[in-house]
Image (cartoon, helix red, strand yellow):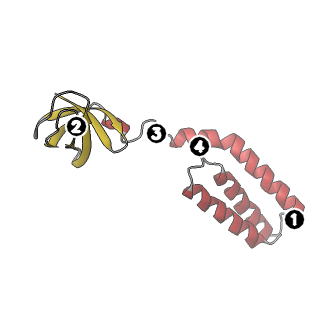
Amino acid sequence: MVWWFWIMLGLFLLVLEMATPGGFFAFFFGLSALVVGTLAALEVAGPPWAQWILFSALSVVGLVTLRGTLQKTLATGKGPVDTLVGEAAVVIEDFPEGGVGRAELRGTSWSARTERAMGISKGQRCRVERVDGLTLWVRPE
């Protein structure tokens, strides 16, 4: 096969990996296609059937041997929003009882809610109990 086909396929698969939350599947296929394309350009990859076998073998071996290690290396555990739980925020807009208000945390204004049956007044400190999307669930201190 033509070497540039493999290069284009590899680049497409790498872009696909970046555009989707695929978990490093297309990544190894993309890298394998780039390797086969480079070998085809150097005219050492052999006939098209051999290139397909080489592509398949490189992809599967990379996927099986390196995917788990790569995922563990790049895993951060908690996301940055999950680390907000337990932190102190300052109310910047009065909360009605059981209602929604605004709170400032780390220099950013957040939508905030409370499960308590009491309102929270502006300027009062509160603790983040949980994060639901972009809403902080807080309790007064």
As drawn, 23 above or below 8: above
Picture disc at residue 39: none
Q: Quadrant of residue 35?
A: bottom right
The residue pinned by badge 3 equals 76
Residue type beneath disc 1: Pro
Residue type beneath disc 3: Thr
Residue type beneath disc 2: Gly
Quarter of the image where the C terminus is located: top left
Q: Secondary structure at mark 1?
A: helix
Picture disc at residue 70: 4
The residue pinned by badge 1 equals 48
Residue 4: x and y, percent? 74, 72
Count neighbours of disc 1 (C-alpha within 10 A) and say few if under 14, some if 14 to 19, many if 20 or more: few
The residue pinned by badge 2 equals 99
The residue positioned 56% from the left and 50% from the top of the image is 21
Count neighbours of disc 3 (C-alpha within 10 A) and say few if under 14, some if 14 to 19, many if 20 or more: few
Disc with the residue nearer the chain's start (1 vs 2): 1
Disc with the residue nearer the chain's start (4 vs 2): 4
Disc with the residue nearer the chain's start (3 vs 2): 3
